[in-house]
Amino acid sequence: MDQSGEDVLSSPFHSVGRDRWAAAGAAPGGGVFEVAITEEPIDLNAIVCRVAHPHVGLPSANLIGARVLFSGEIRGSNHGLEITRLEYTAHKLLAEKHMADVLREAQEKFPLIGAVCIHRLGMLAVSECAVAVLTCGRHRRETYAANQYIINRVKAETPIWKREFFADGTNKWGENCTH
Amino acid sequence: MIKVVFYAQLKDFFGDETELELPANPVAAGIRSALTAKNALAAEWLKVSRLASEDAFISEEEKLTDGGRYYLLPPSSGG
């Protein structure tokens, strides 16, 4: 394995489109639970659609009544300093495994029908999406709460790091943000 | 001999990776103490960093394998 863990991402993971998605559980009715680490721009429209309405075509079995999408994006300043770009690195294998664990634990805590979490790596420009979390449930209360639970844990615990590059030419490792 | 791979702030102290010669029957805690001895300026970051093997976080008591590759992970700052 190289230090990124890249070459260990093999059999347990399946690939859909350009990103490599890892299953993180299943729900009655066919709900999707998936995580991914990607070096490609995150397509929020595609993320919103990753969890289809289970049993679409059978209205009586359609359980999704709320869909919450969080997109964490690159701000143009931090602590009063102008940001030009951020670079994200990760221990990819552990990051993906941890994100999958968080989604499984979210399933145990909240009545979710589906959830997706994807994190971007590499150099990102201001306004780009760094992380997205989609949660789907019957009602907004638990769907919002589950989304916050997932993003809070991913930001605090998943082995991913950012380096901030400033307009004055300096850079520094980012710190965990709780806002 | 083991290999230790670094991330984020720890790269500034140790580079991408280093090799360590540890005493007989080493456990994971020995990585932290050996690295602190190597560069005391990194002590605070070493204290708050997690240890991992190839595919899992490990405890301080985890027995290390000769020739193994281990990872030191500073606090996360993703998102």
Image (cartoon, coloured by chain):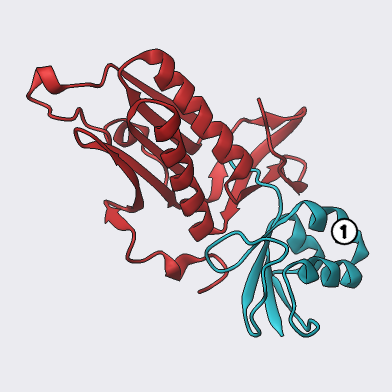
The residue at the point 11 percent across, 17 percent down is A60
**Quadrant of image for the N terminus of chain B:** bottom right
**Relative side of B75 to A26, left or right:** right
Residue A45 percent location from the top left of the image: 32, 31
**Relative side of A88 to B17, left or right:** left
Looking at the rendered structure, the number of numbered marks drawn on it comes to 1
Q: Secondary structure at mark 1?
A: helix
**Quick check: B30 above or below A96?**
below
The residue at the point 52 percent across, 52 percent down is A95
Residue A25 percent location from the top left of the image: 33, 44
- The answer to whether residue A72 is visible is no
**Relative side of A108 to A175, left or right:** left
- Image quadrant of residue A8? bottom left
Q: As rendered, which of A144 and A6 lies closer to the eye?
A: A144
**Quick check: A96 above or below A60?**
below
> The chain coloured cyan carries which letter?
B
The residue at the point 83 percent across, 69 percent down is B35
**Quadrant of image for the C terminus of chain B:** top right
Q: Which residue bears the numbered disc 1?
A: B43
**Quick check: B38 above or below A18?**
below
Badge 1 amino acid:
Ala
Mark 1 packing: few (<14 Cα in 10 Å), some, or many (20+)? some
Write down the colour of chain A: red
